[in-house]
Amino acid sequence: MYRVVLVEDDPMVLMLNRKFTEKDKRFQIVHEFGNGQDALHWLVNNPVDLIVLDLYMPVLTGLELLRQLRGRKMNVDVIMVTAAHDAPTLDALLKLGVTDYLVKPFTYPRFQQALEAFCQQRQALEGHNNVSQAEIDRLLTHSGESPAAPKGLQEKTLQMIRSFLQECGTELTSSEEIAAHVGLSAVTVRRYMAYLLELHEVSARVDYDTGGRPCMRYCMPDPKQNLQ
């Protein structure tokens, strides 16, 4: 089993991380911390395989903790789980070698995808002196990525819709509102939303309070509901 440490100061998100990790029997949670400083003191004497790490925490942030670990030549794998999605932060964390980067609120399928990518990489590298080019290409191309958009849907447009929905959070928004933001027709947006619903990346609710024909409204899943 892979040994995991959870570092998160929000009790609700910590509970969600624990629940999702424990669903995968390949992982064992060995410790949990509410700030980076306590985690650092423990980790320097207790090697683990994976850290699920928040960015914004008291005492020592996730970024500062990761820099401290890399400065000590500790090459533990890290999955970031954070509300931060600005380019400078992402760039800094990627350069420090994070395995994956999940933006809150996230879904169980996306969390499981990050765990699966970690396992695939470990299995490909453990017990082998050499790794084939095909295996390297597979790991670099597919580890941690979302499934490729089906034919007829553009990946760039899909990411624009995802970003807009992340900004809206749990606030409901219609196809028309999304279309106005990304510059597409509402009919086209509905195709993208149907795909995201299949992936369980969004939630949908019928709005009957429109004064006319009911319409579908979408939002990111509420993390509290994932705890049920």
Image (cartoon, grey):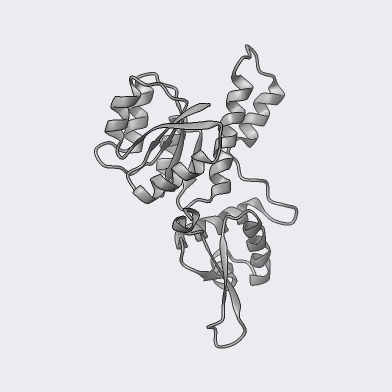
Residue at 60% over, 81% down: 214
Q: Position of residue 156 (x, y in %)?
A: 61, 52
Q: Horizontal placement of 35 versus 137: left or right?
A: left
Q: Position of residue 72 (x, y in %)?
A: 35, 19
Residue ranking furthest to the left: 59
Q: Nearer the viewer, residue 108 or 30?
A: 30
Residue at 65% over, 61% down: 192
Using the image, determine if residue 176 lies above or below residue 76: below
Residue at 67% over, 58% down: 195
Q: Is residue 84 visible?
A: no
Using the image, determine if residue 112 lies above or below residue 186: above
Residue ranking furthest to the right: 151
Q: Is residue 107 visible?
A: yes
Q: Nearer the viewer, residue 100 or 16?
A: 16
Q: Position of residue 121 (x, y in %)?
A: 59, 27
| Residue 23 lies in quadrant | top right
Residue at 34% over, 48% down: 10
